[in-house]
Image (cartoon, rainbow, N blue to C red):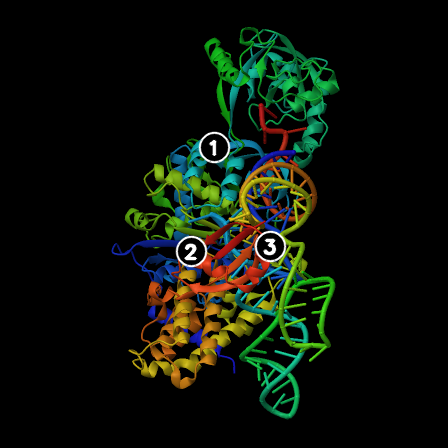
Amino acid sequence: MNYDFHKIEKKWQTEWENANIFKRTEDSSKPKYYLLEMFPYPSGKLHMGHVRNYAIGDVIARYKTMNGYNVLHPMGWDAFGLPAENAAIQNKTHPSVWTTTNIEHMRDQLKEMGLSYDWDREITTCHTDYYKWTQWMFLQFYKQGLAYKKKSKVNWCPSCQTVLANEQVVDGACERCDSHVVKKELAQWFFKITEYADRLLEDIEKLDGWPDKVKTMQQNWIGRSEGAAIDFTIDGFEEKITVFTTRPDTIFGVSYIVLSPEHPLVDMLTENTEYYEAAMDFRKKVEALDEITRTSDETEKEGIFIGRYARNPLNNKKVPILIANYVLMDYGTGAVMGVPAHDQRDFEFAQKYDMPIIPVIKPKDDSFDIDNLKEAYVDEGIMINSGQFDGMNSAKGIDAIISYMEDKGCGRRNVNYKLRDWLISRQRYWGAPIPIIYCDECGIVPVPEEDLPVLLPTDIEFRDRGQNLLANCESFVNTTCPKCGRSAKREVDTMDTFVCSSFYFLRFTDPNNEEHVADFDNAKYWMPVDQYIGGVEHAILHLLYSRFFTKVLYDIGVSPVDEPFKNLLTQGMVLKDGIKMSKSKGNVVSPEEIMKEYGSDTARLFILFAAPPERDLEWSDQGVEGCYRFLNRVWRLVVDLKDAYDNVEDRKDSQLSPQDKKLRYNIHNTIRRITIDIEERFNFNTAISAIMELVNAMYSYKDEVAKEDYTNWVLVEALDTLMLMLAPFAPHMAEELWHMTGHKGSIHDQKWPTYDKAALVKDEIEIAVQVNGKVRDRLTVPTNATKDEVEEAVFTLDKIVNEIEGKTVVKTIVVPKRLVNIVVK
RNA sequence: GCCGGAGUGGCGGAACAGGCAGACGCACAGGACUUAAAAUCCUGCGGUUUUUAAUAAAACCGUACCGGUUCGAUUCCGGUCUCCGGCACCA
C-alpha cells in the first residue's frame, strides 16, 4: 500500500494556511533572513523551471527557519506585459481578466506545492496600489535628472509594436518574440543608468555571494574602457572632430580619420561638394544593413574619402577624413583615428585602401622588422617616430601624451562605456503609465505625487494589435496641466515591465504601506535580500536594473542598502532529452500532472535530487518514480518502527550493542553531512542521498536486530532525526509522520538537529595498504593507533610481505585514518 | 577571436585543503515472497584478461586526450580536443 499523498498534502496545506504558520513580522530578537525567488510572470501555468526555483527556495526557507532565523519568504506576480495584451485582443477580454485568472490558477499551484510563503505579503505589479509606486519611482528619477526624453534611433520590434531596451535585443532579434528588430527614430523616455556605470561596475567587487559568471557578464555589459578624447582640427572649418581612443600613445601613427557614416559632421563637410552624393549613398547603404551584419567582424571593411583633411594636434600632420562602415555612431564619439600599424582593423583597412602604415611603437627586443608588418603590432613597446616621446615605454606614453594634450587643450582623459541609457518607454497598453503631462504652455510637466496613481483606463476596446491603445483613448489622453490648469495631454507610453521588477524586493518588506514604498525601518530590518534565486537569463537585465534602482533609492534615502542581493544562486535549466523543455519542441512535462500522480513531495524531492541547483537538470520519469518509491519506503519504515515511541525508557541504561552504535554513528554522521550540504553549498542532491543512506541503515538495523532486542531510544532518535531532516524537502510527509509518532506542534517549528560528536567516535577504522601507490590490502586498526603501530601492523600482512619480498623498502608513508603507502624498489 | 563553465559506468550524478574512483538513485540481471503478476525485500552490476568443474580468486587498464610535479593526481601545473554559456568591427 502506498501512502495517501493526496489526503496528506491537502490536509497539511489547509492546516498551515489556517494556522498562518508562515506569516512573518519584524522581530528584532531574532536574526533575520530574507529569502527571495524571482517572482513569475503569470503566464497561466507553472512550468518545471518554476517548480525547481521554488523548491530550492523552500528548502532554504524551511531550513533557515528551523535554525532560528526570522525568515521573510514572500511571493508575488510580475503581472504587466505583452502576452496579456495579446491574449486580450485574441479573446476580446480585458488583459486584467486574463492576468487575474492566471494568477488565481498559479497561486493554487504554488499552494499545492506546499511552499512556505507569507501570502499576506503578496504583490501584484498591475494593481494600482503597486504601480502607484512604479510611477512614484519614475517621478523620483525625473526629479534627480535621471529620467529624460530624447529623440534617437531606437530598437523597434515590428511584431510587438513597441520599442525595446538594448538589453532586450539578442542577436538583432527581440528577446521575447524573436522578430527582427529594426531601427526607428523616435522620442522616448530613458533612465540615465550610464550615470551609475562606474558605481555599478566598482560595486561588483562587493558581491562576494554572486557567481563569477554573472559578475563577469555585468562587467562586460558595462564595458568600461579608459582612454582619451582627442580633438582634430579640420582644414577650412571651425569645427573639430573629436575621436575616442584607448591608445593615445599611438597618435603619431595616425594616417587618417574615420567618421561613422551617420556622423552629423558628414553632412556639413560634404555639402555642395562632389563628395556629397557618394557620402549620402554610402550612408544609406550602411544604414540598410541590419545590426548583426553591421557589427559582425566578418563584414568587409569599406569606406570612402569625403574630400576633407584633418590635422593631427601633436605634429600638425595633414590626414584625410573618411567615412567607413566599421565605425559606429553609438559608441565613443562616432569618430576614430586610424593607426594601421597598431590596430588590426585599421591595418586591414589601410592595406585595402593603400594608406600609409606608420610604426610608432617597436617591440623591446626588436624581434621583428617593424617596417614590414604582416599584421598590426598591438602590444606595448618603445615609442618611435613620436618626436619628444621617442624612447618612452608606450604604457607610460599614454599618460604622458594625455598630460601634454591637456596642457595644450587639444585632448583629455576620457572614459567610455558600452552601457547605454535604459529606454523605458513602451507603446503598449498593459503597463504602468508614465506619469507625465504635455502642456502647450508649460512643456513637460510631471504628474504631482499626490495625484498618483495615473490610472490605466478600463474603457478600452481591444481590437487589432499594432496600435497604441492608450493613444486612442481620449478620456485618458485629455487632461489638464497641473501647473497652469489649461487643457493638456498625457504621455501615452507605459513603462518597461523591468521597471516594476526593479524594486519589488523592497516593497515586500512592507507591501501594504500606503504612504511609502516601504517604511524605512522595515526595509532596514529586512534588506538586503540574503539569498536571491533565479535563472541565469536575468544576469544582465533584471539584476543590473535592480542594482541601479537600489543605488538611486539609496542616494535619495529610500533604501537602507546600496546593493539589493547579498547572495545569488543561479539555477540551471530543466531539460528533457538533452534540450530545454518547450512547447515548440513538444518535450514539456507538466508539473500539474506529476503532482497529481505522485504528489508534490515527490516532485520536489526529485527535482532537488536529480542535479545540484546550478547545473542543468535532465528530467527523468523513472527518476521521479524512484523518489516516490523512496518516500514510500520512509513511510513504511516509520509505520513499522513507531512502536518504539511507546517505551522509550526501555534499556536506557544498558550497554549499546554494536548495531546500536553503528546506527547512532549513522544518525549523527548524516546530520553532519546534510548540514554541511545545505549550509555551505546548497547541494541538495547529496543531502538527499545522505537521508537515503540513513534510511538504508535503519532498514539494516531492522534486518539485523531481532525486534525484542531493539533499543527504543536509539530508534526514536533515528526516527526523529529522519523526520526533521526530511522536513524541508518533503514537508507534508514529514509533518504527517511527526504527528503520527505522537509529536505535538508543527515539525516546521522544530529545531534543526545537531550532531553528537561522541557518537561519531569509532573504536576501529579500516585503512588501505598500498605498495607503490597501488592498493594491495586493507587493515582494520584501532582509531587511536599511533603511526608506528600502524606501520608495524602493515608489515605483518601476508599479501604485503609477498608483495615486497626481494625488494628494498625505500620509505613508508602513513596517513592517519586513511592509508599506508609502502614505496619499494 | 576574447572571457567564463564543463567533460567521470548503460544513465542522472558522488568523491577535489592531493590519499581506497564510481556514494545515492535509475536502468538491467539473479533470488525470496506469490497459484501468478504487481508491489516489496535481498544480492550483483566500469572494462579487459587469466586461473577455476563451479562457487570464487587474481592481474592489468580505466575520471576527454598528451605530457609534467608527487610516495600517491578525477583533484595541482603546461599543452590539445569537444560541448555549453556570455561578449564580439567597442576604437
Q: Identify which amino acid the numbered label 1 is placed on.
A: Thr
In this view of the protein, can residue A729 be seen by the observer? yes
Q: Residues within 10 Å of mark 3 (few under 14, many from 20)?
A: few
C-alpha distance separating marks 3 and 2: 23 Å
Q: Which mark is residue A806?
A: 3
Q: Position of residue A372 (x, y in %)?
A: 71, 15
Task: Mark 3 or mark 2: name the one nearer the start of the chain.
Answer: 2
Q: For the residue labelled by badge 1, is the local secondary structure a helix, a strand or a loop?
A: helix
Q: Residue at x 38, y 46 (%)?
A: A452
- Residue extending furthest toward the front: A806
Q: For the residue labelled by badge 2, is the local secondary structure a helix, a strand or a loop?
A: helix
From the image, tell me which residue sits under label 2.
A788
C-alpha distance separating marks 3 and 1: 77 Å
C-alpha distance separating marks 1 and 2: 68 Å
From the image, tell me which residue sits under label 1.
A194
Q: Position of residue A726 (x, y in %)?
A: 43, 68
